[in-house]
Amino acid sequence: MISRPLFTAVLLFILITPFLVQAVVDPLSQADDAYNNGEYERAIRWYDEALSTNPNDQDAVMGRLRSLAALSRWDEVMNGINRFNLTSLDTGEVSILRAEAAVKTGNPKEALNILNNTTDLNRTEEVRIRSTALIALDQSEEAASLIRNMEANGPLDPRLSLLMGTILIKKGNVSASLPYLEESYLALPHDPDPSIYLADAVTSLGMYEEALDFANSAAFLNQSDPGTWVTIAYLNSRLGRYDEAIEALEHPLAVKPDDPQLLNAKAYALYLSGHGSEGRILAEEVLRQHPGNPGAMDTLGCILLSEGNVKEATDYFEQAAEYFPKDPEVLSHLAEAYHLQGLDIKAEDLYQRSIRIDGSSGRAWKGYSEVLMSLERYPEAASAIAEAFTYYPKNKELIAWEEKADKVLVDWYLKEEAANTTSSHE
């Protein structure tokens, strides 16, 4: 039998335990710990818990906004800034958040305006956001100059290293970009951006398996970015894994079933896998919903070309190329269409531009080889064929072209030798 004093003590313990636990578990501390560990969704839940107790807790407000920013949920960041009336606070951190949100939601000029009208800014953060805005405004050289000035004063912040890497990639200097990107990748383990930019960099070097590893790493860190899944699908397609490419798009499409970028990527993967009719339905649907969508026009052009409708395919490719004048795949698709119409000089120029941008496309090298053979430019054709062989080592067409080019070059050599011998005897 339990004595009355013991019973009373047990009862009191049971009654006060929830309050003791609540006192021990501080939502703000839990949120900060989650944020520091890269668990941003969990951090947001704890910040919301803190705000439910004290709606005016500025630490919780800023922590929540930082977590949303880390997840690239910039529309929510902007909504939060307005909801909590932070635009009236002339503090450095608020201004940085406002400026970055402006850049990420497509208003880089507003970002620069915010920075120009705010004092007490952290210099590293200011340079980071200012450089991001300048890049968005196609002023990459000015952005690079700002970052180099910071680099001259000591080791770069890893986020500035990331920006410098992206600038160098856009300039086509991939080898110079890699040290910057690798540094940011190691220093920012919870940030998906270094992974995705490294994927882009090594893709341009033809290292598709390595690029796929980086892209998968980025998707693990941020599953909500459709662009990352499109990259994964693209890399799987380059590796001939069309089923994996289509599968990679199923998850984001379940979340965003009407996303034109995702739908077009699936349409293109279906075309590559031999399901052009299914791909055509998707591409046409994208164009119905988003008239003039350049990605869908390029995909539909590929499908029409495979069906023998060269003229209509060319029209789509030309429109896509107006939007994407530096997209190597779009350029090579248009080049293929021109070649089929006998416009080999135009096709040659487009293939050269495509290969200068991305020399890792086997399809472009093969198409370029065919055009050079058609133009009877055999020395150049032999070099292009050798490049194409690295992607299609047993391709019968390439073998036949190589044999023809070799025969012509040998005949030229023998004729030249004979002519030289004759002239020496005279």
Image (tube, helix red, strand yellow):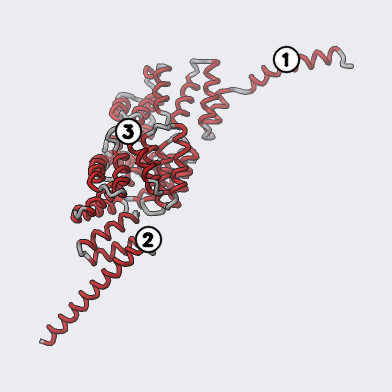
Of the image marks 1 and 2, the number of the one nearer the N terminus: 1
Camera-side residue: 134 or 377? 377
Relative vertical location of residue 44 with respect to residue 222 in this rendering, above or below: above
Under mark 3, the amino acid is Arg
* Label 3 sits on residue: 130
* Label 1 sits on residue: 15
Q: Residue at x 54, y 16 (%)?
A: 52
SS category of the residue bearing label 2: loop
Contact between marks 3 and 1 (CB within 8 A): the answer is: no
Horizontal and vertical percent position of residue 396: 35, 64
Relative vertical location of residue 252 with respect to residue 341 in this rendering, above or below: above
Q: Does the rendering let one see residue 171? A: no
Q: Residue at x 25, y 51 (%)?
A: 335
Label 3 to label 2: alpha-carbon separation: 45 Å
Horizontal and vertical percent position of residue 289: 33, 31
Horizontal and vertical percent position of residue 75: 39, 26
Horizontal and vertical percent position of residue 171: 29, 47
Work out which residue is located at the far left of the displayed protein and give it.
Answer: 426
* Label 2 sits on residue: 392
Determine the image quadrant of residue 11. Answer: top right
Contact between marks 3 and 2 (CB within 8 A): the answer is: no
For disc 3, the neighbor class at 10 Å (few under 14, some 14 to 19, many from 20) is many
